[in-house]
Image (spheres, rainbow, N blue to C red):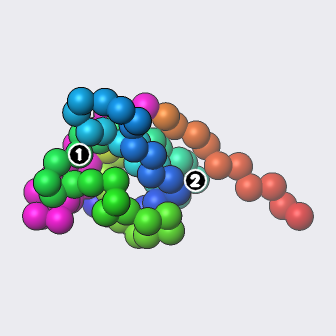
Amino acid sequence: MQAAIVIDVEPYAKVEIQRFILAVRLENMIYGADFRADENLKATDFMIGDRVHVVVEHGKMTLRDRAGRLQTATIVREERVILEPR
């Protein structure tokens, strides 16, 4: 698992099954993944700027929830971060 930084957490509004998008920055990429919330994984578990350990491969993002279980979600957004010299 690699250390990433939480960029954004956005819960879905008014859906039967609670879901949220978790966006993290990993090296020079930002990945947004669509997670399903449960008793061990909620949008409120994350704050912008938090460090989380994730695995990103084959269009999926995997992280550990509060119970230590692996949670996997589909990546719905990828964005390359381009830093321009000043």
Measuring from the top left, give residue 23's x and y in whole percent: 46, 49
Q: How many numbered marks appear?
A: 2
- Using the image as rendered, state which of residue 84 and residue 36 is in the foreground: 36
Residue sticking out furthest to the bottom:
50
Tag of residue 28: 2
Which residue bears the numbered disc 1? 37
* Identity of the residue furthest to the right in this view: 86
Are circles 1 and 2 on residues that touch, CB within 8 Å? no
Q: Is residue 45 visible?
A: yes
**Could you tell me how far apart the alpha carbons at marks 1 and 2 are, in whole angstroms?**
27 Å
Q: Quadrant of residue 1?
A: bottom left
Residue drawn at (50%, 53%) of the image: 8
Q: Position of residue 70 (x, y in %)?
A: 15, 53
Residue 3, position as x, y percentages in the image:
39, 66
Q: Residue at x 58, y 40 (%)?
A: 79
Q: Is residue 59 visible?
A: no
Label 1 neighbourhood size at 10 Å, few (<14), some (14-19), many (20+)? Answer: some
Q: Secondary structure at mark 2?
A: loop
Q: Quadrant of the C terminus?
A: bottom right
Left or right of 58? Residue 13 is right
Image height of 67 relative to 80, above or below:
below
Toward which corner of the image does residue 57 lie, by quadrant? top left
User: Would you say 64 lies left or right of 68 here?
Assistant: right
Q: Which residue range is magenta in the image?
A: 62-76
**Residue at 14% across / 54% down in the picture?**
39
Q: Amino acid at mark 1?
A: Ala
Q: Mark 2: which amino acid? A: Asn
- The disc, 1 or 2, on the residue closer to the chain's N-terminal end is 2
